[in-house]
Every structure is written in C-alpha cells, then in structure tokens.
Image: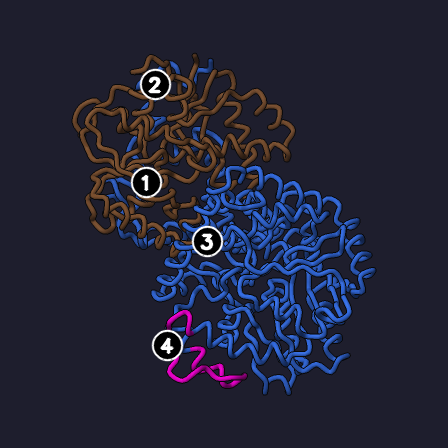
Chain colours: A blue, B brown
Amino acid sequence: MTQESTERRVVPTFLGMPPFPDAARAALANGQLRTNLARATTTIRLKRAVAVAERPDWQELRAAGEAIKDDVLANLPEYLERLEARVTEAGGVVHWARDAAEANAIVVEVARAHGVREVVKVKSMATQEIELNAALTEAGIDAWETDLAELIVQLGNDLPSHILVPAIHRNRGEIRDIFTAEMGAVGRPAPEGLSDVPAELADAARLHLREKFLRAPMAVSGGNFAIAETGTVVVLESEGNGRMCLTLPPVLVTVLGIEKLLPTWRDLEVFLQLLPRSSTAERMNPYTSMWTGVHPGDGPGEFHLILLDNGRTDTLVDPVGRAALRCIRCSACLNVCPVYERVGGRAYGSVYPGPIGAIITPQLRGINRHPVDKQTSALPFASTLCGACFEVCPVRIDIPEILLHLRGQVIDHKRARLVPGPERITLGVAGWVFGRPWRLAAAQRVGALASRLLARGGRLRRIPAPGWAGAWLSTRDMTAPALRSFRALWRDRHPTENGKRP
Amino acid sequence: MRVGLFITCFNDTLFPRVGQATVDVLERLGVTVDFPTEQTCCGQMHFNSGYQDECLPLASRFADAFAGYDAVVTPSASCAAMVRHQYGGLARRDPGLAEKITAMPPVYELCEFLVDVLGVTDVGARFPHRVLLHSTCHSVRMLHIGDRPRRLLSAVDGLSLVELPGPPQCCGFGGTFSVKNPDTSVAMGLDKVDAVLATGAGVLTSADTSCLMHIGGLLSRRDDPVRTMHLVEILATTGELS
C-alpha cells in the first residue's frame, strides 16, 4: 500500500487469514451466520434438485460437459491461439497475463490510456482472484461492483463467501443496514426509511447503480465461456447489470481464465443447460450476453480480452488435479457441502470457497510444485470426503479424489522435513503397528489395559489428553478398546487353525 | 465358497461384537467364514490423511492376506470402498501391488454380499424396536449400496424402520477430519444428533461403526439414551435386545 492509497478505501483481502480449522471455529461461533447459511443453502439445494430432475438426460449432459472440457484442456494452446486470432480479426485486442500482477497492470494501463477514473464491474471470479479492485484503488481508479450481492459485499467492506451469491452470509436486515449506512458515501444514498423488503432493497440498488452505469467510461467483466471457433465471449447473469456494463461504457475489458474456452459455438448448448440448472436452479439463464470483438455504433468501441494464467498451466500439468480446471463456477458443490453449510465461505480464505475452492486454491497457489503456507495446506483437509460435491458437479469433477491427491502432495512436502510433527509420528507408529499382526495384537492388549484403567461402561469419557485423543474426547465420548479384540476371540475359538490359509 | 472375513482394524479393536455378529449371520445362512489372521488394516486412515507411501505396505498385506479366497466380506462400507476404489490408484505407485490386486478376490460390504451374492433379504432376525437407519456417505456414494440396508432391515421381524427426511447428509466424522477439524465435525454431528432425537427412534444403525461412534459419542456425552448398533448386530439378533 502506498501512502496516497491509505486515504482511499482499503479493499479487504483474504491474505493472512487463519488456517481452516481456526477460521471455521470462529465462523461456527456466529449463530446469525449459521442460520443465514443453513437457510440459504437448503433453499438453493432443493431448488437445484428439482431443476435437475426435470432433465432425463442430465447424466448424459454431465458426461458431455466433462468431455468437452477435457478436450479443451488437452488442446489448450491450439484453442487459445484460435480464440486470439478470431477476437483480433473482430477488432478486439488480446493480452496474455502470466499472473495477477500482469493482468492488473494491463487493466490499469487501459484505464489510464483513456483517463478513466471509475469503472463498473460485472460480477467476475477472475477479477476477484487477481484482486483487481485493490489494484485499481491503488491506481486511483474507483471500481464499482454492480451485481447486487457483490455490491452488498463491497459496500459492507466485506469479503465474498460464495461463488454465485457472495453475500449469502447476510440476511435482509443486515443488507438494509449496509445500504443505509454506506451508499451515500460512494454515490446516491439509500432512500429514507428503507425497509428490508427484498423489492425495496433491489430498488435502492437499482437507483444507486443506475447513475454509475450511465457515467462510467469503462467496464470490466469476466467471462463464463469463450468460443475459440468464433472469438465470442459469453457472460451469464441474472440481474441485467451485466448487460448494462457490457453495452453502455465505450471501453470494455474482460479478464478470462485460460480454461474458460469452448471449442465451438455448438458446445454452448451443453453448458447453457448445465450451468443455470446447477447454479441458480433456473431452466434458462435470464441474461446471456455474447459478443464478438467490436461493432461500430453498437456496444463498446474498444474491447480488450486478457487471457489469465495465474497458476492454471501449473495445474494443467497435474494429471489428477487438472480436472479441477473443468469447473464452470456454478457453486452447486458449495450448496450441497455439509462443511460449507456450517462454516460458510470465508473460512476457506480464498475467493474460491467450498469443495471446489479446496481443490482450486491450493493448485493455483502451486501446491504441486512447492510447499505451500499453512492456510493453503489445510484446505485439502477441510472435507469429510462425503462425496456430495462430486454427485452434483455438472462437469463431473471427482472432488474427493482430487482432495486426496492434494493431501498426498501436502504430506509429501512435509516428508522433506527432518523433524517429524506429532501427526507424522502418530501415523508412523500406527503404520508400524499395522505392519505385523502380532504388533496389532500387542497394541490391542495395551488398549485393553487402558480400558480397564480409564473406561466407564465401555466408554472413555472426559479424559484430558493431548493431540487427536484430546480433540475427540473434549466433546465426544469414545468407545473404549475391547477387553478382548476380535482376533483374540477368534484365536480362543479356533486354537488350532491359527491363521490357516485356504 | 471360501469367504474371508475382513474385520477392519477399527471393529477388531473397538467393536469385536460386530465381527462376531457378522460371523453369526453368515454361518446361519450356511456360509463358512474364515478369518485370515495376517490381516491388519486396509490403510484407509493413512491414505485419506495423505500418507500414501505408508499405505502401500498395508494394501499389499491386505492383498496377501485374502489371496485365494472366493470372496472377502466386511462389515464396513467405508473400508470396502477404500479397497475397491483406491487400491487401483495406489498400485500406480507400486507394480508389485498392481499384480497382487488383480489376483484379489472381490470385496463385498456385508449388505451387498447378503443381497447380491446370497440373494437373501430375510436373514431370520427378530428385533422389535424402532430403528433409525443412518445412510453413510461411503455406502451411498462410493459403493452405491442403494436400498440394500433398507431391504435387510425391513425384513427383520418386529422392526420398525425410520429414516431421516431428505437426501443423506454426512454426520461429520470423516476419519481424521473428526480430530483435525473437531469443531466443524462436532457441529455437523450435533445437527445429526438433533435430527436423530427428533425421530424418537431408540436405536441408531448404519453400515459403518465409525460414523456410529462419532454420533454415539455425542449422544453418550449428552447422556441421550439412543443406542447405536451396527446393522449386522441387528441382523444377528434373533430374540430380545440384550
């Protein structure tokens, strides 16, 4: 942060968030948050199930989505170059950004070239990922979020907690309070006596945003899809704010992750079915904007497409992990995740929360190439591996499989350390015990002795203990090791057979 | 048919009665059960915690212990899923293991073995109680066990089956998740406990003792009287609940 930027609004960041177990503990203590989340995720979950059940060919659609995305990933360089050629032919300017800094610099450069002091934004995960708003603020440029939920997050000086519904952690009363307190400082204030009726809140947002749409000389968007065959960029949204941004300002900049490509126009057919039903539980998306370069007198006169890598090619190298790049950001996995439902998105410490975040964030941060920080390395473990996410994923990403794969990478990095931590010692001892049946039998006899000393009614109750035992016993009783293990009982009953083999 | 019982380290050490119940039910149905004592642990705890190298010798030991049987039967959906779903991937790290697992007999979760292999749903049990079936994640989503547990329980004399509304949701156990993320695990578990208590069922059952130990541990800490039993313990019962 430079000196002058501290006078401006400081844009919140996920940087420096505590690791998942600690962040989750804090979130769980927030009763309001849990109520808001449980209500919202349950509603979306049920609606999605209905929308999906309407399609008898849903599994075929999922398989098609998977196959198309796998083809894109397998032939990415060719498709990217084709897209670049088509966009350029249609009058757009294509930029390549290796990382967040390069992408942000390009946006700032375009803005400065036009003397732009404020931009309107279409909801976009890519620009959240690169923290574009902070970079623009730093450069003295105001960036206004125009998606209703993003607006709530921005006005509340808050962080998003969901891919599709970034303000899912807020209820109507909280939103009313944020609008009333904050709108006036950055534009048209909220109407006097604003209530928490959804229609009134939406109207306040419309009025507040309208003057920004009409005034802003530049818009920034992401993209849901980009068609290599035609050079067409596609944005799906539900509020019409995107359409305003994409058509009114004279300059448009789109930041697009390189994995967002589709080979042909025809492929859209599959995704325009998969995405709305999976994300908003709608049969058809309300506002689908598609544009190919520029057209004089129609929409922006200048269009820049920034193709963003930012860890994606590193992810692509990993034969197991690369399936995460199929993701179309529908957030169905968040809505069904029992962990997400309890702790919310911010505990994941990334713009990509929930199950998909737990596999995308560590990979974008280079987990397959080098050790990562504690916050990142806790993410693959932030799951019970229940598999609900894989079941709903419209592009069939086997999230539990990738979580397990990334857990392996975390541990493989730790292996390089000379001094093992308590977990490595515990599992090392367990591995040794399981290495021979007699060792297991001996350990079971030690367990039985502990039971005789400590158990009451076959249970270990409140016993102060370190590490994993303490983590269990502080809140739950534990079944005590049996006085005679099964293998001991079996030997009693089959004394002569003793491990007989067929 | 030569059937090897895969007891799982968890049941072996903590719930030997589940192993005995499995043997009782299978023998009642005329199956001769053997317990190869070379078995220890399938390696799921190590594998799911990221210790894949440490898992390799355990997978190899498993394959050796059960080589030569016609079928392996286990009273754990989660461990059956580990062997069936993960050993193939693990074998990519170890050609020796790859060879062993191609020769391995099929591994069945108990309900699958009863319904699919033996073709039995009525195992001659009597259990006059209100029983809540908790559909465990790995049984539903990895084994696709479907309605097999339900069919087995429904055929039990006197048993009144209760299920939670809506699609099955995780209880929060998750193996080492339960101790690496204890707060989240317990929050999920307590929601499950509330749902269980709301049904008024006296017995909670499932195809995995691990999930039951988590939910049961919370019930027990609150001194709630709901009893947790593995499904096979119910199937083994022919008289009154002891």
Indicate the quadrant where residue B74 lies: top left
Residue A192 included in the magenta stretch of the image:
yes
Kindly identify which residue carries mark 1.
B212
| Chain letter for the residue marked with disc 1 in the picture | B
Residue B51 included in the magenta stretch of the image:
no
**Which residue is drawn at the image coordinates 22% and 29% (left, top)?**
B159
Kindly identify the amino acid type of the residue bearing the numbered disc 2.
Val
The mark lying in front, picked from 3 and 1, is: 3
Residue A401 in percent (x, y) is at 55, 42
Mark-to-mark CA distance, 2 and 3: 38 Å
Q: Earlier in the sequence, mark 1 or mark 2?
A: 2
Find out whether the residues at labels 1 and 2 contact each other: C-beta distance under 8 Å: no
Q: Residues within 10 Å of mark 3 (few under 14, many from 20)?
A: many
Indicate the quadrant where residue A62 lies: top right
On the question of residue A454 being in view, the answer is no
Please give left or right for residue A326 compared with residue B21 in the image: right
Find out whether the residues at labels 2 and 3 contact each other: C-beta distance under 8 Å: no
Query: Looking at the image, is B27 positioned above or below residue B149?
Result: above
Mark-to-mark CA distance, 3 and 1: 25 Å
Residue B182 in percent (x, y) is at 39, 54
Kindly identify which residue carries mark 2.
B120
Mark-to-mark CA distance, 2 and 4: 62 Å
Kindly identify the amino acid type of the residue bearing the numbered disc 4.
Ser
Q: Quadrant of the N terminus of chain B?
A: top left
The mark lying in front, picked from 1 and 2, is: 2
Kindly identify the amino acid type of the residue bearing the numbered disc 1.
Leu
Kindly identify which residue carries mark 3.
A335
Instruction: Give the magenta part as a residue range.
Output: A178-200
Kindly identify which residue carries mark 4.
A195
**Which residue is drawn at the image coordinates 66% and 69% (left, top)?**
A247
